[in-house]
Amino acid sequence: MDPQTVFCPNSACPARGLVGKGNIGVHSQKDRRYKCYECNKSFAETKGSPFYRLRTAKDLVVIVVTLLAYGCPVQAIVMAFSLDERTVLSWQRRCGKQCQDVHEHLVEQPRDLGQVQADEIRAKIQGGILWMAMAIQVEARLWLGGVLSAHRDTSLMLALVAKVRACALCRPLLFCVDGCQTYIQAIRRVFREPIRTGRSARPRLRPWDDVLIAQFVKHYARKRVVAVTRRVVQGTWAQIEALLQQTQGGGVINTAYTERLNATFRSRIAALVRRGRALARQMPTLHNAMYLVGTVYNFCTYHESLRVPLYLPYGKRRWLRRTPAIVAGITDHLWTVEELLSFRVPPPPWRPPKRRGRPSKAMRALVAQWCT
Ligand SMILES: [Zn+2]
């Protein structure tokens, strides 16, 4: 147990979420509990992770969740490990939530995205269908998140584009999408910045510079692609060619990267397999499954096309394998599923409560100690 790597999870504590500040000590080696000397509360080592208060051994949970993340049917796990189906689904729910938190904490940070491709998957659930829209950063093959909706409408596209915006820096950005017009409206609506003038009225919104939109439309006849159209909706061909060169080493406007990602998701979520019998009962199940698969894909799987050659002495060559998260600069190594599930997402930093008048001496001391 190393108190230097742990933060206080207590939401009322001024030291919450801060690591290495000397406020944490070991409370009990036997029970594996820490203590925060600022708020005088003790907490379990697993507090805030999916393993908190589970009665099953951590190893078994990690094995089961790894199997789920690679598309193993729940019934196979139930039979192999003699578990109850509800237990397996509750672990999937906990781990899906954990993966979503990790994703929002580490991936949804502003970065230079270059090229983004977006697409939707049609999924069957009990009593209807569901649309799962997802986006990928092409250069790092990084999954940027996904949203679910019963309809393929403006609100689905707006939610997806808002997810992309949460990951974007105001740099040249190319969107490659299919022929759906709703994407274009959603991108134009989301990628705007308010111009603050100090007046009390609603500020005017200015669109971001250098947001380029390209469409890749497939034309079908008898369920086969017979022709494709490449269209520039926003920006110039020269700008788009420069970004394609930077992010995929040249080539043409396409949606191949997002379609390959869809294939990965289809193979790893039983409910997305075409003509399959396994239906997800409800939207939250699919939501958790999506975050589990997506985060394991980003952090725990080497991507074949991201490897780079290492030239060693005497003309030898080795391949350096990389995950999307390594290429995006989020981490420097391949995460194990256990590492992903044990990662504790810190709460947002503490802010002093808003009160009228001059803050008390004690409050000023707390602010000086923990808010700098
Ligand atoms: Zn505390």
Image (cartoon, rainbow, N blue to C red):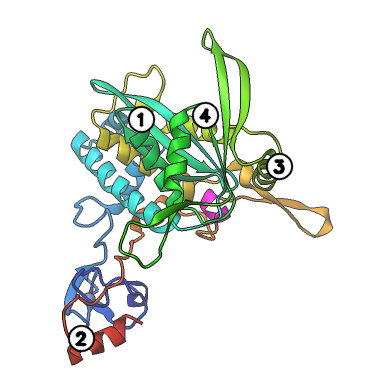
Mark 2: few/some/many CA within 10 Å (<14, 14-19, 20+): few
Report the Cα–Cα distance between label 1 and label 2. Answer: 49 Å
User: Residue 281: percent from the left, percent from the top?
Assistant: 24, 28
Residue 363 - label: 2
**Mark drawn on residue 238:** 3
- Measured in 3D between alpha carbons, the distance from the residue under mark 4 to the one under mark 3, in whole angstroms, is 20 Å
Q: In which quarter of the image is the C terminus?
A: bottom left
How much space separates mark 1 and mark 3, taking CA atoms? 32 Å
The residue indicated by pointer 4 is: 178
Q: Measuring from the top left, give residue 143's x and y in whole percent.
A: 47, 44
**What's under tag 1, amino acid-wise?**
Asp
Instruction: Give the camera-side residue of 210 and 56.
Output: 210
Q: Earlier in the sequence, mark 1 or mark 3?
A: 1
Magenta region, residue range: 323-328
| Mark-to-mark CA distance, 4 and 2 | 55 Å
In the picture, residue 141 is in which quadrant? top right
Magenta stretch encompasses residue 325: yes
Which mark is in front, 4 or 3? Answer: 3
Which numbered circle lies on residue 270? none
Q: Please report whichever mark, 3 or 2, sits nearer to the chain's N-terminal start.
A: 3
As rendered, which of 308 and 126 lies closer to the eye? 126
**Tag 4–tag 1 contact (CB < 8 Å):** no
Q: Which amino acid type is shown beneath numbered disc 3?
A: Ala
In the rendered view of the protein, which quadrant contains the N terminus?
A: bottom left
Viewer-proximal residue among 184 and 222: 184
Q: What residue type is labelled 4?
A: Asp
Task: Point out the tag, 4 or 3, that comes first from the N-terminus.
Answer: 4
Marking on residue 153: 1
Q: Is residue 27 visible?
A: no
Residue 240 is covered by the magenta coloring? no
Amino acid under label 2?
Met
